Image: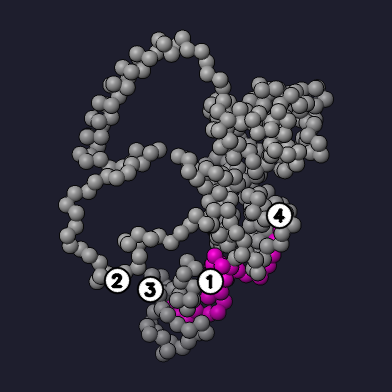
Amino acid sequence: MSVWRNQMRTVVLAAGAAAFISMAVSPASAADRKYPALGAAATPEQIQAWDIDVRPDGLGAPAGSGTAPKGEAVYIEKCAMCHGDFGEARGRYPVLVGGHGTLKDQRPEKTIGSYWPYASTIFDYIKRAMPFGDAQSLTNDEVYAITAFLLNMNDVIDSDFVLDASNIGKIEMPNAANFIDDPRPDAQAVKVADLCMKDCKPEIKVLGRAVIIDVTPDKGGAAAKAAAKEAAAEPAAAETKAEAAPAAQVAAAPAGDADAGKKVFNKCKACHVLDSAKNKIGPSLQGVFGRTVGTADGFKYSKAFMAAKDKGMKWTDENVAALVASPKDFVKEHIGDDKGRTRMSFAGLRKQKEIDDLLAYMKQAGGQ
């Protein structure tokens, strides 16, 4: 929308129609307008209420300011019910924090920190569309504060950084350099009269296929696709059957791939570190294996974990695996809190392989 700021600043929406009328910012008389019978002159107040976009360079950012600590309080009240206390998301809502280093994965986690190119986009979107169901109810200070909180959670700014109109367009986002202008000829602006509509290719050849979701169209339609899938399944089934017997005799492979576990740890790094004793939102995990639960120096634990400390519970492989699989179930079943109360809002890892990989990486990177 920002690209239209200068061209469309004086747009008037016709009442009950999709017609637009260009006019000066100051109200004009009906006689001065090109189509006086349509719509009405927009007042400065109406234009200001519509013209709320913030450009990547910060142009259009309103007066106001905010910091991460102030934003955390607003975020918990207005945003956490959908996006989680730490931006890890709940249900099917978008993840806002983490995802660093996953953009080349088959299922990249595109968050504010791992993907978004401009800090101003965060402000613009929150101001325009959030909270869900109550859009544009936040003050400018609240929007600045929430934006600062999310940038801080993604390690883009410090917690004491004061975000305002003077600096929001100057913040360097981690993935900004990977956004480039589309160089393809068919992506450039051209006049319709200049478009080539002759000597078109007689045949379309598929050069790449969707990897995760099979949506690439095949020649022959659905029937051909089903036949090809059935034909491919027969040798695969025979191969699986032939390998079943020897596979049963093979000893179990060492659990956990540390390299894969590093990617899994991206889900944890917004709150925890492995390579130092510094606590973040959660306690440091340096040397966690074999350590008594609830003893990270300087971290304030919940009552449940303090109770585990009093019992002398240790962070064994089994206990760490149970915690990352389901924090609430761990608190219920291993510590004994019947309500599973914990400030750790992470939902847990569903796949055993991810758990094994994560533990392997944690041990390698400083967990013990």
Can see residue 134? no
Which amino acid type is shown beneath numbered disc 1? Answer: Asp
Label whose residue precedes the other's in the sequence (2 or 1)? 1
Residue linked to disc 3: 19
Residue linked to disc 1: 51
Residue linked to disc 2: 191
Please tell me whether mark 1 or mark 3 is closer to you in this view. Answer: 1
Q: Residues within 10 Å of mark 1 (few under 14, many from 20)?
A: some
Residue found at x 25% / y 40%: 218
Residue found at x 40% / y 60%: 182
| Foreground of the two, 101 or 71 | 101
Q: Residue furthest bottom?
A: 31
- Residue 14 point in image, percent of width and height: 42, 74
Magenta segment range?
A: 39-67
Which amino acid type is shown beneath numbered disc 3? Answer: Ala
Q: Is residue 86 above or below residue 122?
A: above
Residue linked to disc 4: 158
Please tell me whether mark 3 or mark 4 is closer to you in this view. Answer: 4
